[in-house]
Image (cartoon, rainbow, N blue to C red):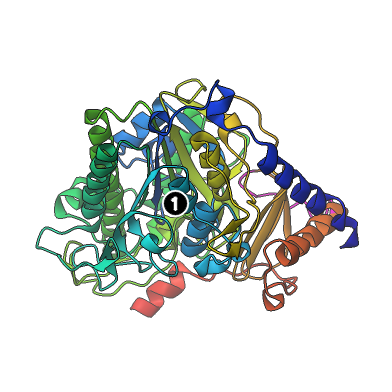
Amino acid sequence: MAMFKHSTLQRFTIGAILTLGLAIPFWDSLGAAEPAASRPNIVLIMADDLGFSDLGCYGSEIETPTLDGLAQNGLRFRQFYNTAKCHSSRICLLSGLYCQQAGNEAMDNAVTLAEVLNQAGYFTAMSGKWHLKKEPTDRGFQRYFGHLSGATNFFTGDQTFRINGEPFNDFGKDFYTTDADTDYAIKFVDEATASDKPFFLYVAYNAPHYPLHVKRKDFEKYRTRYRDGWDTIRKQRYARQIESGLIDPRFALSNRPDYIPAWEELSEADKLWEQERMAAFAGMVDCLDQNIGRLVNHLKSAGQFENTLFMFCSDNGACPFERTRGKELRPWDPDSYWCYDTGWAHVGNTPFRWYKQNQHEGGISSPLIVHWPAGLQTDPGSFTDQPGHLIDFMPTLIDVAGAQYPSEFEGRRITPVQGKSLLPILKGQERTPHPWMYFMFSKNRAIRQGDWKIVSANGGKWELYDISKDRSELNDLRGEYPEKAKELIALWHEVAEEVDHLPAKQRGKVTGKPPQPMNSYRADMKAAK
């Protein structure tokens, strides 16, 4: 590992410090620094367990006209990454650091976006899922509505709901979490507008995370849409991705793994069950888009939309966990607890392999839609292939807000930001890429350097891919390029130890065996019966 100590890691650390110390704020680059009230508003939305292909503008048959419209008039990222897991993605988004590097759920070594933007004169508000230590109002958010838990009942809520730090239990008969998150987001926009400050609004929707709680009208819209099954739906999504230009035709559609049966192998009863639970998921995504539409329309009516930087992403790839209870209940019954399984998760991550928690492209690839009428300098509806990561939000928002990243905060030393600003990409330029991007959750790990990526699923053997030619990760090149594989494996271990400060027990060697799925459709169905 010594060969890296004065090359990749040291050069990056020095470069990051220099960049932070000498960076010119975006508004200064346009001329004299603008007063706080004229700086852009920022709306950052994160969906929960939404796969790469689950939006219409990313290939889906699910109707998402609001997000599709923002994409058609904005910029879409083809290679934007999350961490493949709920809590770690939220840490990266909020801190600009990798998970352990930030101090895990406590984020003791980090400042949050809200803390930084608060000091820069922004009104800061959040609605939705927190899933970290303390509460948002303890970490820089002046307003908060939502739940502190990692998942909740969409109709009845749970005991972790808070409004501005106080318990919330006003769950009436018409309560639905996605709607309520939007109601309060709109309320906070109004409060921010009245304050005459620019605002930062972070909306962390719990949808479409399980349980698959859906309004009946949204379910009925999709009830028969999935009768053709996952094999056909996945091919149709892939065809739309190719036609739209989202996916390069060189990147083949990955095969259905053998632990997922062909649709035609299912009994008629199982086909009906699968159709219905995918309809529930689709209805939740549709409702999510409807609510984002409400927020967008409110921003327009308030005269705030043109100068609002709007960003939408997901916290991980589609979820394969089968934890269904109350299968006999309808999904609009609060006592139901439906999930979908690997069969539909495989569709959600089209055209990629693996799922939430895994560090293959299916687990870590997120849609990212950027819309900003007053500031985006790319052609409407365009794509970018420049890779980005959730850790890039912190330096990006620092740039657009003219904020400063502190070395100390409330008596704590703060780790220098790891991310790199996306602003050059938003201005239609090429940015200096990350020297590497690091990924880890449980027994899943990866590192990407340039177009090379080394990855291990569930503690299985390392696999090497050239992402520029094989984004679907179908052709393992480790046998052809053993030295490159060895170099990247060593780099992963060094970054895990020296940058992310990962405990030694989580940095052990992987097995030399093929990776085994943690979730199997066949096993889950057998257990359910």
Q: Which residue is drawn at the image coordinates 74% and 60% (left, top)?
A: 495
Q: Position of residue 21 (x, y in %)?
A: 68, 42
The image quadrant of residue 24 is top right
Q: Is residue 478 magenta?
A: yes
Tag 1 secondary structure: helix
- Which residue is the extreme one toward the right? 3
Question: How many numbered callouts?
Answer: 1
Classify residue 447 as left or right of residue 221: right
Crowd band around label 1 with a 10 angstrom C-alpha radius: few (<14), some (14–19), many (20+): many
Q: Which residues are magenta?
A: 471-481
Secondary structure mostly seen in magenta is loop
Q: Is residue 24 magenta?
A: no
Read off the residue under disc 1: 114
Q: Position of residue 510 (x, y in %)?
A: 72, 71
The image quadrant of residue 132 is bottom left
Q: Is residue 346 above or below residue 458?
A: above
Q: Nearer the viewer, residue 305 or 216?
A: 305
Q: Position of residue 190 (x, y in %)?
A: 23, 41
The image quadrant of residue 456 is bottom right
Say what amino acid the circle numbered 1 marks: Ala
Q: Which residue is drawn at the image coordinates 38% and 55% (left, top)?
A: 141
Classify residue 432 as left or right of residue 328: right
Q: Nearer the viewer, residue 71 or 225?
A: 71
Examine the rendering and report whether any part of residue 268 can be seen.
no
Q: Nearer the viewer, residue 45 or 19?
A: 19
